[in-house]
Amino acid sequence: MTIETAGRLTETMIIDCHGHYTTVPAAFGEYRDALHERLAVPSGSGPVPAPPAISDDEIRETIEANQLRLMRERGVDLTIFSPRASWMDQHVTDPATARAWARASNDLVHRVTTLFPRNYAAVCQLPQTPGGSLDDSVEELERCVTELGFVGCNLNPDPSGGFWSSPPMTDEYWFPMYEKMTELDVPAMIHVSTSRNPAAHTLGAHYLNADTTVFMQLVEGDLFGWFPTLRLVIPHGGGAVPYHWGRFQGLTVRMNRPPLDGHVMQNVFFDTCVYHQPGIDLLTSVISADNILFASEMLGAVRGNNPDTGASWDDTKIYVDNVKMGEDTRSKIFELNARRIYPRLEARLAGR
Amino acid sequence: MTIETAGRLTETMIIDCHGHYTTVPAAFGEYRDALHERLAVPSGSGPVPAPPAISDDEIRETIEANQLRLMRERGVDLTIFSPRASWMDQHVTDPATARAWARASNDLVHRVTTLFPRNYAAVCQLPQTPGGSLDDSVEELERCVTELGFVGCNLNPDPSGGFWSSPPMTDEYWFPMYEKMTELDVPAMIHVSTSRNPAAHTLGAHYLNADTTVFMQLVEGDLFGWFPTLRLVIPHGGGAVPYHWGRFQGLTVRMNRPPLDGHVMQNVFFDTCVYHQPGIDLLTSVISADNILFASEMLGAVRGNNPDTGASWDDTKIYVDNVKMGEDTRSKIFELNARRIYPRLEARLAGR
């Protein structure tokens, strides 16, 4: 997008902060199956299998025909890219499997960013297990950031997959992750994986519920008193939160918590994965532009076109473009907030 | 509210479809404590205690000083009233306790409707238990409707209180309730009770998540193919659903389900318990007026005044009044939908 600032034309970069590698080559899905099959038989069934050989061409094809094609069509310059959320499989209790699967998934995403360095920056999956130690996750985050140039991570608040057996994210259980994130200066997107609970549909309930649940945990607790520079991105437009902003403001007063703007919203950001115009209108009218990051989660939960408009449901750039706002505000949502919240992305872009 | 219809002035009745008796006399809370204390000691600790004696004056005082005072101040004529949602205690596994507690809670609400017949109609709590038979619930619904004149019930999709151990509401497990509801021609509001899960705050997460979760269960299933006249009210503005309406429309297409308007929205209704203007603006712009019922959940989750406006957060009538809409639309939201969806209320009002 070309905008005029102080009399000169400048270019606003369009950064999508939320994309997953949902179109991996088939061999990678077979590798996942092999990991699960190993766990289905009694223990002692041999070592964790090694990841498959996947060629650069295979990766190029799956990206160019899908995510990158749509980015070009829609005018998105760069996507902050991570392994497929619904395949993070953090319900698996075996730490060796979790480590191998996260490492292979992150290595694959890293190759995407190496093949398309101008279009992708990487965010890592963590080898969390339900109730397990976070040591492996801390180690994998460090590896991805310091060795592979990742700019953040996806942190799953409910590794159980819909049973919510973990303590709230304000609990000390999570502090080792926050300490490492603070040390490395990387944010986390809060993102659950597939629901294992038949009551909660993954895409239509579990994802949105997780966003709402964690936001309320942050309202109740004082996490950012402990970690003042910690930054968390809550995806899917913040779940139910902006729609119920008055409810959360009122609860904050009733519970004698600090006002949201001076407390949680100093460290929490919502993305724009809301797939209709009225939702984006509400988000941008209720939440400060400093707390909104452009995103589409493409190719994600909702694919195909809205028959009423002919446009893709998840082409969220159209909705944001339709909102009347100043160019400074627009630049924040499309570019500047992402560069601020992901300083390792900023460092890379500044070095171009 | 006075409106002009076909040249003559008619009065639109203001019906709030969602109020709880959150201000019960202290003795009733002590009774609840006694029920819980009995369960805390080993079994064989004696019969379930009987409910306390509470005078009509005590009931009058707790209603007149609270809910009825606010109804009068805000111009609400009638509230569809039910026992306190956060005290439904359906996580308790002892059926005898569940029966006694539901019966006592419903009898108390019945007395409110007897003392204030012009201002209150009753909806019952059900003696559900986690995974337990619904026979007691069916029986209590029948008692409340046929003997006490109740007009509906609150059905808890997650008696476990935040662990979601029950099957989806489209499962045959729930059919005995739907058969009785259909026979009696009464709707249910979908309403969970207190969260027992430390991850999910009752008012700021569990309530909203339940609304979203059940809506998606209904999208996935074909409940209304089995029960074409069944009517379900999803409270708190439909949880996250209207804000993410495009997501749900897109998922419906992707999952090859019938369009929402011709399927789920023939039988599902959202209330207006959304505590700020932008939320009500979105709700009324996205959801058909035929599917919206005025409600405040007063006195409920959010009490006190918005310091920015000086008005009560939960005075939702102000927000609805501020929406530009025709008087026919307004009458649907404030009165006509409630009379249509609760035919036993309609019968009573028509008989006045």
Image (cartoon, coloured by chain):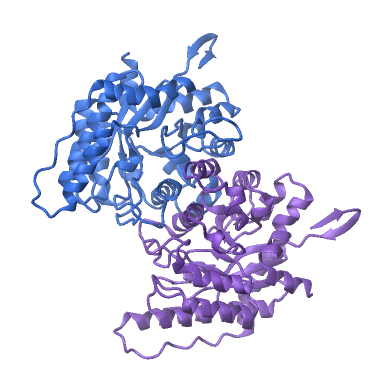
Chain colours: A purple, B blue
Instruction: Using the image, determine if residue A101 lies above or below residue A248.
Output: below
Depth check, front residue: A243 or A203:
A243
Image-quadrant location for residue A122? bottom right
Instruction: Using the image, determine if residue A49 lies above or below residue A309.
Output: below
Q: Position of residue A349 (x, y in %)?
A: 75, 71
Give left or right: position of B21 versus A317: left
The residue sitting at the bottom extreme is A46
Instruction: Using the image, determine if residue A208 lies above or below residue B349.
Output: below
Q: Position of residue A46 (x, y in %)?
A: 36, 91
The residue sitting at the top extreme is B8
- Regarding residue B115, the answer to whether it shows in the image is yes
Give left or right: position of A27 versus A328: left
Q: Work out which quarter of the rendered image holds the C terminus of chain A and state it.
A: bottom right
Residue drawn where x is 61% and y is 48% of the image: A261
Residue drawn where x is 36% and y is 51% of the image: B195
Q: How many marks?
A: 0
Depth check, front residue: A300 or B207:
B207
- Regarding residue A316, the answer to whether it shows in the image is no
Depth check, front residue: B24 or A238:
B24
Give left or right: position of A339 versus A144: right
Depth check, front residue: A243 or A317:
A243
Q: Position of residue B115 (x, y in %)?
A: 28, 19
Q: Position of residue B68 (x, y in %)?
A: 39, 23
Q: Work out which quarter of the rendered image holds the N terminus of chain A and state it.
A: bottom right
